Image: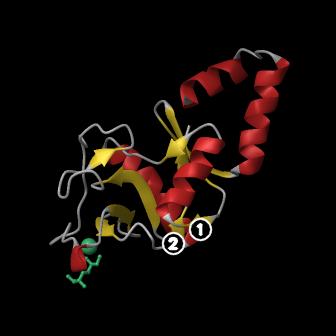
Amino acid sequence: SGQELRSEFQNLGTLTENISLCFLVIMFPNGRIVGEKIFMTSGYEGNFDSLKQRCSQAGGQLASPRNAAENAAIQQIVVLYNKSVFLGINDIQTEGRFTYLNGENIVYSNWQTREPNNDKGIEDCVEVYSSGKWNDKSCGEKRLIVCEF
Ligand code: GMH
Ligand code: CA
């Protein structure tokens, strides 16, 4: 988690742990720290599966905001890049029931008015607009990556 990474750095922990943190910062230079989480983008754009895989490969997961402060941090990255992002939230398993990647029902949402609308019956993923509001969107669309660590 972000807190673990920070405390390791503050404690001048092991060399390999500090190298890991430097590697993370180099790979994802644009980060936002909120409580115990760090949200970061590499600038990569891809479909939901591709974004999910890349975050996982980097040792994190696709951004999954659990409160307004975390959503605001993600919104800042959307504004900075002028590109919408996909969250680690979807209703692939059960239409209309949005969950995190671990299957847990979401505890926070920030839907745009009249969303989610499952437009054309094919919208199971969630994008964040520059307003910070959410829209359900087809998982096959390409959006900016934001991972959390
Ligand atoms: C439809 C309309 C729009 C809405 C889009 C969006 C697609 O085209 O309801 O007003 O913005 O769907 O929900 O994801
Ligand atoms: Ca929609």
**Ligand 1 near label 1 (Cβ, under 8 Å)?**
no
Residue that carries the numbered disc 1 in the rendered image? 45
At 41% from the left edge and 70% from the top edge, which residue is drawn? 130
The percent position of residue 145, horizontal first and vertical second, equals 56, 59
Tell me whether circle 1 and circle 2 mark residues in contact (CB < 8 Å).
yes
Q: Which mark is residue 137?
A: none
Categorize mark 1 by other alpha carbons within 10 Å: few (<14), some (14-19), many (20+): some
140 is higher (above) or lower (below) than 42: below
At 25% from the left edge and 57% from the top edge, which residue is drawn? 110
**Ligand 1 near label 2 (Cβ, under 8 Å)?**
no
Q: Viewed as shown, does residue 128 lie left or right of 30?
A: left
141 is higher (above) or lower (below) than 38: below
In this view, the residue in front, 108 or 119, is 119
Give SS at disc 2: loop
The percent position of residue 81, horizontal first and vertical second, equals 57, 69
Residue that carries the numbered disc 2 in the rendered image? 142
Asked where in the image residue 103 lies, by quadrant, the reply is top left
The percent position of residue 112, horizontal first and vertical second, equals 23, 68
Residue 141 visible (yes or no): yes
Name the residue type under label 2: Lys
Give SS at disc 1: strand
Residue ranking furthest to the front: 93
Q: Viewed as shown, does residue 8 lie left or right of 16?
A: left
The percent position of residue 32, horizontal first and vertical second, equals 55, 47
Categorize mark 2 by other alpha carbons within 10 Å: few (<14), some (14-19), many (20+): some
Dot 1 or dot 2: first in sequence order is 1
| Total marks in image | 2
In this view, the residue in front, 35 or 51, is 51
If the image is split into quadrants, where does the C terminus sit?
top right
Name the residue type under label 1: Glu
